[in-house]
């Protein structure tokens, strides 16, 4: 017979998916703490809130497996309650209610006040910027907009997150100041689409003005741009990046493909020529810029010729950072009406080929760094190494700089100057200058 847990009400927030979900969990935790609740992130707790991802098949599978894992713990009396929120819950609530009824309650992406109420907390509107950050103390994600107005054929984000909504500059600055006061030195700006920032509330693309305001925040040393859309990119951002040392010479700009007929079917609003010209402009205005992109292979109708065109283009552009995904056939998207005609093994083979090519490019670019000096921030200590990053690297997805901890003592969260002594395809080894 199930016995009630003797632990007092400790709320464990479990986060799955992208940096936008990390941000949302941190806001939820900040609200709970402000109501006097005992809240932890991915630790022991008798009440569990799972913030799910519903983007592509692998992410959905991980979310469902996590829900089932905690439902089993509930059945065995290890925990008392399980609540589910986030994108999977937003997108598939009726199905989830039917398939996994033992969850205490499901909440969508816009139902934070209702979730808080069930957890015995009040939603406090005045808590701008009050978050319990879960990242290392030196960096934090800063969401500048929610939702997306782009019509990309393969993407379910507008279904889960709604229309684009920019956060006013003054609110973002308040949040940045609070983060800086807590020791954050690097802001990673995130949104479904940074490029669109400001169009809804300022009637113009206003990312450059936001950046010019954020660089004035005391204590912030690096500001990094994630998830810019190529169509309609505001070119004045490049001038700010070039002139403001706090703006990292780095941009994450998911391009997805380069074959014109695939881009058209994907409804990306651009062409191979326009995309290539945009990237050349980036490198012309900011020669030091590191460009990170992501690609999709195996999209419906992608021929071997389309794939070879993409592969040749990757070899030509020599991206500093690149990730590759296999196409996921998502219901309720525009592309779901197309035939998912590229076999899974072919999709995987194409992704492997792209990443093998990128691994070689990355190795060659890293070899060029040997003997050069860089400013790095130390994120953590791991085994016998302090692990840091340059301004050209984002956490979790990019190169790391490894410094021998048996020879040098460094503080996490601090900046230091290093010389690169050796390099592999995705790691740099360095000594402190």
Image (spheres, grey):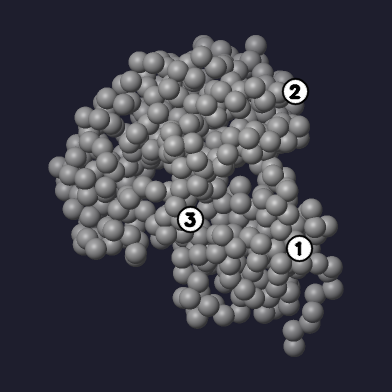
Distance between the alpha carbons at the discs numbered 1 and 2: 43 Å
Q: Earlier in the sequence, mark 1 or mark 2?
A: 1
**Residue 326 in picture, x, y percent from top left:** 33, 51
Can residue 395 be seen in the rendering of this structure?
A: no
Q: Is residue 283 above or below residue 393?
A: above
Point 33% across, 20% down: residue: 281
Can residue 164 be seen in the rendering of this structure?
A: yes
Distance between the alpha carbons at the discs numbered 3 and 2: 44 Å
**Mark 2 neighbour density, 10 Å: few (under 14) some (14–19) many (20 or more):** few
Q: Earlier in the sequence, mark 3 or mark 2?
A: 3
Point 33% across, 25% down: residue: 279
Point 51% across, 14% down: residue: 243
Of the 4 image quadrants, the one containing the N terminus is bottom right
Identify the image quadrant of residue 356: top left
Between 1 and 244, the one nearer to me in the picture: 244
Q: Is residue 162 above or below residue 267?
A: below
**Residue 80 in picture, x, y percent from top left:** 73, 74
Between 169 and 432, the one nearer to me in the picture: 169
Q: Earlier in the sequence, mark 3 or mark 1?
A: 1
**Residue 235 in picture, x, y percent from top left:** 39, 24
Q: Are marks 1 and 2 in contact (CB under 8 Å)?
A: no
Tell me the residue that label 3 is attached to: 161
Tell me the residue that label 2 is attached to: 409
Q: Is residue 358 above or below residue 127?
A: above
**Mark 3 neighbour density, 10 Å: few (under 14) some (14–19) many (20 or more):** many
Identify the image quadrant of residue 387: top right
Of the 4 image quadrants, the one containing the C terminus is top right
Q: How many marks?
A: 3
**Residue 388 in picture, x, y percent from top left:** 61, 28
Tell me the residue that label 1 is attached to: 121
- Secondary structure of residue under mark 1: loop
């Amino acid at each position: 017979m199930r016995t009630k847990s003797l632990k007092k009400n400790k709320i464990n927030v479990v986060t799955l998916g992208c940096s936008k979900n990390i941000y949302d969990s941190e806001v939820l935790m900040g609200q709970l703490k402000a109501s006097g609740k005992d809240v932890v992130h991915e630790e022991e707790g008798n009440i569990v809130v799972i913030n799910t991802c519903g983007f592509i098949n692998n992410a959905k599978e991980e979310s469902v497996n996590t829900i089932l894992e905690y439902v089993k713990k509930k059945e065995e009396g290890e925990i008392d309650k399980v609540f589910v929120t986030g994108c999977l819950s937003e997108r598939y609530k009726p199905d989830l209610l039917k398939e996994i009824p033992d969850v205490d309650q499901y909440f969508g992406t816009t139902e934070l006040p209702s979730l808080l109420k069930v957890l015995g907390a009040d939603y406090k509107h005045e808590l701008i910027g009050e978050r319990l950050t879960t990242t290392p103390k030196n960096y934090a994600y800063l969401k500048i907009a929610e939702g997306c107005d782009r019509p990309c054929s393969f993407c379910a984000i507008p279904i889960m997150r709604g229309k684009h909504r920019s956060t006013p500059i003054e609110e973002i600055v308040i949040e940045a100041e609070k983060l800086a006061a807590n020791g954050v030195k690097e802001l990673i700006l995130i949104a479904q689409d940074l490029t669109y920032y400001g169009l809804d509330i300022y009637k113009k693309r206003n990312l450059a003005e936001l950046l010019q305001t954020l660089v004035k925040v005391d204590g912030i040393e690096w500001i990094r741009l994630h998830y810019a859309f190529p169509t309609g990119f505001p070119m004045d951002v490049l001038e700010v990046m070039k002139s403001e040392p706090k703006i990292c010479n780095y941009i994450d700009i998911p391009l997805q493909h380069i074959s014109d007929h695939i881009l058209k079917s994907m409804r990306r609003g651009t062409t191979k020529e326009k995309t290539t010209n945009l990237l050349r402009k980036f490198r012309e205005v900011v020669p030091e810029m590191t460009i990170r992109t992501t690609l999709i292979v195996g999209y419906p109708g992608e021929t071997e010729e389309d794939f070879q065109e993409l592969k040749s283009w990757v070899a030509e552009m020599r991206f500093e950072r690149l990730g590759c995904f296999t196409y996921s056939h998502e219901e309720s998207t525009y592309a779901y009406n197309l035939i998912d005609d590229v076999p899974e093994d072919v999709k995987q083979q194409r992704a492997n080929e792209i990443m093998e090519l990128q691994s070689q490019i990355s190795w060659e670019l890293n070899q060029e760094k040997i003997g050069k000096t860089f400013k790095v921030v130390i994120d953590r200590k791991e085994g016998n190494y302090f692990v840091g990053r340059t301004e050209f690297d984002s956490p979790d997805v990019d190169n790391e700089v490894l410094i021998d901890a048996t020879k040098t003592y460094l503080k996490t969260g601090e900046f230091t100057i290093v010389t690169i002594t050796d390099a592999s395809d995705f790691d740099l080894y360095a000594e402190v200058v």
